[in-house]
Image (cartoon, coloured by chain):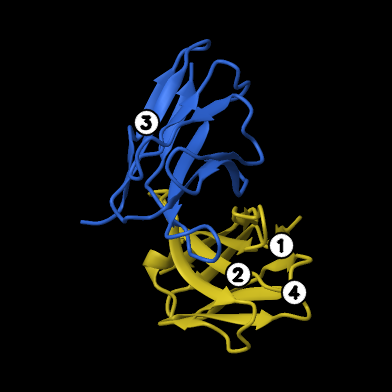
Amino acid sequence: DGGITQSPKYLFRKEGQNVTLSCEQNLNHDAMYWYRQDPGQGLRLIYYSQIVNDFQKGDIAEGYSVSREKKESFPLTVTSAQKNPTAFYLCASSIGTSTHTQYFGPGTRLTVL
Amino acid sequence: AQTVTQSQPEMSVQEAETVTLSCTYDTSENNYYLFWYKQPPSRQMILVIRQEAYKQQNATENRFSVNFQKAAKSFSLKISDSQLGDTAMYFCASRSPGAGSYQLTFGKGTKLSVIP
């Protein structure tokens, strides 16, 4: 089946640890995105990537890092520098970045203990 | 910068009835795209409907339709014959394809409950 997968579904992290969230898509989409969702809020963009080996910061990139070594994969690392990392993280992809609709994965719930 | 406002934090509707969710937006662009996404309790974001600003005709998708008022910058979602599976958070979002504007700008959402 074509789609976007995120793993794990739930993730727990101790303060001071880095953690990496996985996002994979087999839709042959060029663009991929990471969003953060907090209770009572809409989604906010962390990073996006238009093509392999290229990515750009979104509105709230501080404390996060990404890589795009393969078209299918766009992992997000939440570093210890992120002050309030507990949130729901959603990955999305689109055919391109200009006009096309973004499709979302099922999300990862990160909790910092 | 774009902003999206959803003024109804929560709404409820009886099963089989019709409900309209409101959304207003602000953008300086002339060419842009508007979306409604649904987020059920599973929390996956699902595209409901999309509207291109240059199209005057309102988009429809089965029981879902929009009322797009470009001059008023209004983009409401109408759900007809509401079903229990429509219970979810609904997010309005906008996107401008202008340079550097690759993100979706989301409203804060409306929680819709369909009552049996």
The N terminus of chain B is located in which quarter? Answer: bottom right
Viewer-nearest of labels 4 and 3? 4
Q: Give me the C-alpha separation between circle 1 and circle 3.
A: 31 Å
The image's mark for residue B54 is: none
Please determine if labels 4 and 1 lie on a single subunit: yes
Residue drawn at (60%, 17%) of the image: A81
| Residue behind mark 3 | A10
Q: Give me the C-alpha separation between circle 1 and circle 2.
A: 20 Å
Relative to A8, A63 lies left or right: right
The image's mark for residue B33 is: 2
Q: Secondary structure at mark 4?
A: loop
Residue drawn at (43%, 21%) of the image: A19
- The hue used for chain A is blue
| Residue behind mark 4 | B73
- Dot 4 or dot 1: first in sequence order is 1
| Residue behind mark 1 | B7
Give percent across and percent down for residue A21: 40, 30
**What amino acid does circle 1 point to?**
Ser
Q: Is residue B19 above or below residue B37?
A: below
Residue B11 seen: yes
